[in-house]
Image (cartoon, rainbow, N blue to C red):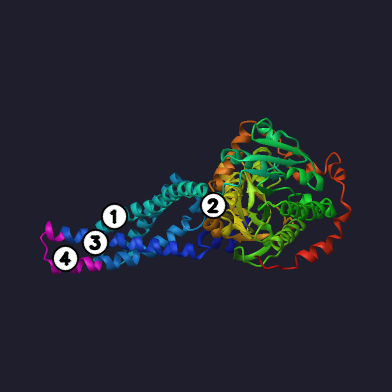
């Protein structure tokens, strides 16, 4: 049963109408394809009338022109409306290739049937040819399928070329990488990618969540483990010896976890990050990759990019913006921070989390038989944890003149979804579950994001689509790998709030007043760099 959020006029518009100028360009392109298909069908009929049926060229031309006009006027608008209803320009764009082909074929067939029905209802339809309609339908279906599948194939081919070029452009000095927070959700997905690329990896992590996430790499000859708190300056200095670049993933992550102890959050997320960056700069380490978040955009109805105004609605987002400002101020000819604003992450890694919306709702669908939706019309960009890790590799490879002191949104333009639409995708994978609308939970975030800059300058494109990630999580649950999503090990806030973990994380004397620190580093609304 559809929820109110899924049947509201706003939700219907989001499902049917393109949300970007590129979407309307695709509408125009499809209309041109349809006109071309009709023209080709009419041309073939013209040749048939003259060569086979023996009509004079004048009569055949007159009939053909009338057939072209009537068929175009009826078929094109009917097709565009039908294609929109089938999600050609919204959610259907992210379908896997086989589903995309079926969707295109069904859309064209339905449009053709509707056009034929309209013709039958017209009193004067002598200029309309059923043969032209059938041929035009066949040509249009073939062209539309080739356009969509061909684009996907071209993207895959060029992606391999981009990766090869990125490898050849990688500075030779980048050989040893320090990953702060390397045993976490993203870090455990990043380590194997760095090893494949030939890096030596030094993992700096207090191992609060244990070592299981990176157990497969503890004995690897190119992996070194530093078990320490990155707030300890002496430990940071030792860990950065002989390091070429730093990837800083360490933080208290997520709004609920940050709310457990706000001063501790400031201490770890902002003060320690500043210190880590200062040590890196002092030791001459050039490249500093920092993990930020798209939640810095907060609540907005606009399509946002790296230059959009920021509107943080949580302490977590505010600390990330403050860190961005600190790092950008530190940038110079010898120190090159690169800031990655990750979309909402989902999927499995060495340290999987179920306190993230896609993983959580998929788990609830299996274990609880329901998919609870609050604020279903709110937008979020999504990215698989494997792609988040891949973007870090691209940031390490990118030429400094393109990446230095730059902010990059990490995700894909086709991976913006409403929470309600994400719930529908989960329901398609777990059809036994029921979508259930629950009262608004107070999360005011609402943002759609563009990712053109990362695609252009980092040559990054996500490999995963949201449906694939949902299937991955679902398969892990069905196979028994995940026995209880409520286990504290899968949740930052539950784990930190259990067994006195938060209490054991002493706050440095220099943490300072929370409001003062946030006010100094990030005003109420800050323009993106």
Mark 3 highlights which residue? 42
- Answer few, some or many: residues within 10 Å of disc 3's Cα (few below 14, many 20 plus, some between 14 and 19): many
Task: Judge from the rendering whether residue 496 lies leftward or rightward of residue 51; answer left or right.
Answer: right
Tell me the residue at 28%/68% (across/down). 69
Does 441 appear above or below 393?
Answer: below
Q: CA distance from mark 3 to mark 1?
A: 11 Å
Mark 4 highlights which residue? 60
Q: Which of 458 and 90 lies nearest the eye of the viewer?
A: 458
Tell me the residue at 60%/49% (across/down). 396
Question: Earlier along the polypeptide chain: callout 1 or callout 2?
Answer: 1
Question: Earlier along the polypeptide chain: callout 3 or callout 1?
Answer: 3
For residue 460, the mark is 2
Task: Judge from the rendering whether residue 362 lies leftward or rightward of residue 497; answer left or right.
Answer: left
Question: Earlier along the polypeptide chain: callout 2 or callout 4?
Answer: 4
Q: Position of residue 296 (x, y in %)?
A: 69, 60
Q: CA distance from mark 1 to mark 4?
A: 19 Å
Does 513 appear above or below 214?
Answer: below
Does 418 appear above or below 201?
Answer: below
Q: Which span is picked out in magenta?
A: 49-66
The reply to whether residue 431 is in sight is: no
Task: Judge from the rendering whether residue 207 lies leftward or rightward of residue 87; answer left or right.
Answer: right
Which is more foreground, mark 2 or mark 3? 2
């Amino acid at each position: 049963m559809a929820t109110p959020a899924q049947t509201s006029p706003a939700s219907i518009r989001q499902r049917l109408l393109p949300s970007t100028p590129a979407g309307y360009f695709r509408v125009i392109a499809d209309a041109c394809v349809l006109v071309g298909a009709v023209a080709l069908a009419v041309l073939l009929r013209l040749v048939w009338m003259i060569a086979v049926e023996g009509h004079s060229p004048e009569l055949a031309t007159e009939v053909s022109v009338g057939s072209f006009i009537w068929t175009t006027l009826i078929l094109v608008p009917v097709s565009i409306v039908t294609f929109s209803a089938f999600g050609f320009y919204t959610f259907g764009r992210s379908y896997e290739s086989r589903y995309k082909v079926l969707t295109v074929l069904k859309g064209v067939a339905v449009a053709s049937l509707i056009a034929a029905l309209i013709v039958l209802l017209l009193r004067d339809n002598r200029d309309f040819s059923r043969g032209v309609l059938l041929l035009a339908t066949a040509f249009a279906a073939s062209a539309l399928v080739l356009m969509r599948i061909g684009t996907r194939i071209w993207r895959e081919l060029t992606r391999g070329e981009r990766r090869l070029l990125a490898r050849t452009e990688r500075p030779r000095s980048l050989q040893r990488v320090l990953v702060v927070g390397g045993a976490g959700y993203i870090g455990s997905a990043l380590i194997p990618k760095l090893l494949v690329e030939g890096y030596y990896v030094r993992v700096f992590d207090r191992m609060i969540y244990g070592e299981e996430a990176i157990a497969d790499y503890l004995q690897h000859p190119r992996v070194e483990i530093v078990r320490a708190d990155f707030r300890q300056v002496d430990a940071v200095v030792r860990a950065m010896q002989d390091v070429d670049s730093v990837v800083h993933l360490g933080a208290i992550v997520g709004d609920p976890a940050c709310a457990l102890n706000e001063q501790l959050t400031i201490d770890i997320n902002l003060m320690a990050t500043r210190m880590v960056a200062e040590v890196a700069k002092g030791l001459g380490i050039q490249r500093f990759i920092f993990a930020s978040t798209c939640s810095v955009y907060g609540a907005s109805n606009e399509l946002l990019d790296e230059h959009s105004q920021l509107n943080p609605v949580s302490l977590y987002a505010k600390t990330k913006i403050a860190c961005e400002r600190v790092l950008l101020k530190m940038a110079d000819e010898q120190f090159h921070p690169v800031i990655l604003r990750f979309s909402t992450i989902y999927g499995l890694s060495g340290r999987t989390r179920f306190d993230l919306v896609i993983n959580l709702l998929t788990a609830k669908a299996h274990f609880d038989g329901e998919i609870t939706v609050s604020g279903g019309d709110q937008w979020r960009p999504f990215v698989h944890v494997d792609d988040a890790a891949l973007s870090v590799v691209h940031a390490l490879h990118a030429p400094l003149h393109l990446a230095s002191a730059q902010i990059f949104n990490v995700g894909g333009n086709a991976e913006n979804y409403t929470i309600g639409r994400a719930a529908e995708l989960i329901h398609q994978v777990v059809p036994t579950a029921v979508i259930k609308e629950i009262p608004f939970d107070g999360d005011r975030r609402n943002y759609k994001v563009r990712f053109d800059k990362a695609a252009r300058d980092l040559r990054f494109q996500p490999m995963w689509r949201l449906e694939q990630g949902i299937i991955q999580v679902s398969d892990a649950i069905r196979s028994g790998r995940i026995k209880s999503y409520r286990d504290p090990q899968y949740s930052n806030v539950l784990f930190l709030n259990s067994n006195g973990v938060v209490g054991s994380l002493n706050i440095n004397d220099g943490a300072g007043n929370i409001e003062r620190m946030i006010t100094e580093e990030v005003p109420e609304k800050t323009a993106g760099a």
